[in-house]
Image (tube, rainbow, N blue to C red):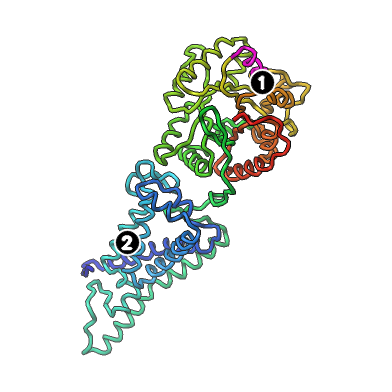
Amino acid sequence: MISISFKNKLVPAFLALLRIVIGWHFLYEGLIKIFDPAWTARPFLEGSRWIFGDLFRWMASGDTGMWIIDKANGYGLTLIGLALILGLFVRLASWSGIALLLMYYLAYPPFGGFSYGALTEGNYLIVNKNLIELFALIVLGLTRSGQFFGFDMLRNSKTADGSLQEVKTADKPVAREINRRRELLKGLAGLPFLAGFAGAYIRSITDNIPDAVSGATIKVDYKQLKDLKGKLPEGKLGNLTVSRMIMGCNLIGGWSHARDLIYTNTLFKVYNNERKIIETLYLAEQASINTVFMVTQFYPALNKYKQIYNGKMQSICQAMLPEKDFFSDINLAINSGATALYIQGGEGDKYINAGKFDMVHKAIDHIKKQGLLAGMGAHSLETIKACEREGIPADFYVKTFHHDKYWSAHPEENREEYSIIANNSSDHNKYHDNIWDLFPSRTIEYMKNMNKPWIAFKVLAAGAIEPKDGFRFAFENGADFICVGMFDFQVIDDINIANEILGSLKSRERAWYS
């Protein structure tokens, strides 16, 4: 303990103010957690990936232990905040606060990418608000700041003149009584702040002001891992074990297919920044999705996710076939760490429609020579038929598949094969980016006898079909896997729906080729 005499009489006052404002922050954080029945520290602990990550995830592994941690967090913050505001047992409160802040800092240190998964107010390098507040509490704990305008002044019978010496007025009863009154008034200095806090807090609850953002506060409104009802079934794609539902990449890339809503692509890109992509990949893999469709420009984010979280997410990359440097995108995907590749659907349609079967054959052979599975993507069923007819040795097919019973579906009488790759047509009646399997009944009939694995994509017609409806249609009518684009707040729901449907299939005729 350090006893300090201050020549500047303002120093004790500002130390008291520092103590009170930190107490205010702790108290608010604690009360928000206590009175919010949905709050839990579980996602905060589960997301930790630094050297103490295993310890924090172990702490979150049991319901009883998690209940204790949540209560200790909420009530601990509240009691520390009250003690600091009132200046009562400040030394104990300061060191307790230091312990909590140190844990928050070690769970998500602001360097090396380890802060992914924790809400922050900005970008930091080593020093963040938790560390700053931690050192401020060390100052308060070492200077016995509760002696300044706090109840510790009365508890220890010390003066508030900055010297922290005992009162020596025994021979002057009147002076001693006056000093005691002054001590009492100064000791009550925290009460107006506490009253102000109470008023502000009540207003914040009434006005639905959101929770404060700190390392201690992770709050989300969507389902978390605890709401997962089961692990996704898996199937075989060649030598790969793949979850029956694969995460799509359109929402990551900002390709929304939102008909004539021109702002949605930009909106998706703003929401799915690199941090959000990494968080979504982590949630998906923890929830049992083990494979994601990928495009080459997003491999830096995927590889950063794997580095930070030691992720094992597999990737099936869409390969483009540029005429000038035909194998360039394939080679980039392989060098970026793709697990498997397939010729992107639009590219496959374009080359097959133009009769360039030999070029597609070369692309598939080139992928397979690198030791990777090679698939063929298509919007048109005629592309799949041509591959089978021409003996193009694709290991699997990636084919659009959804019903057309939604209001914005293109009228069947206006549908033409390969119109999707000619979507720049000036004739609005031919195609307007609102349907991707032009003839689903034909797809069902032909794929029924296909003896290669089939990954169905666009199963929700880019958001026009409800997941329960689209997933069931795809699985019951022959798809071995479905590729589904999803935001982070949809991951758990989509997995639960897929599990429910896979567990209750009744009318599937096609055998599982996976």
**Residue carrying label 2:** 137
Location of residue 446 by image quarter: top right
Q: From what the image shows, is residue 146 above or below residue 487?
A: below
Residue 461 in picture, x, y percent from top left: 67, 32
Location of residue 445 in the rendering, given as x and y in whole percent from the top left corner: 73, 24
Residue range in magenta is 380-391
Indicate the amino acid at tag 1.
Answer: Ser
Residue found at the very far right of the displayed protein: 413
* Rendered residue at 74%/21% (across/down): 415
- Residue 276 horizontal side relative to residue 354, left or right: left
- Other residues around mark 2 within 10 Å, as few (<14) / some (14–19) / many (≥20): many
Q: Residue at image x 58%, y 18%?
A: 347
**Main structural element of the magenta stretch: helix, strand or loop?**
helix
Q: In which quarter of the image is residue 242?
A: top right
- Image quadrant occupied by the N terminus: bottom left
Image coords of residue 119 (percent x, y): 45, 49
**Residue at which label 1 appears:** 380
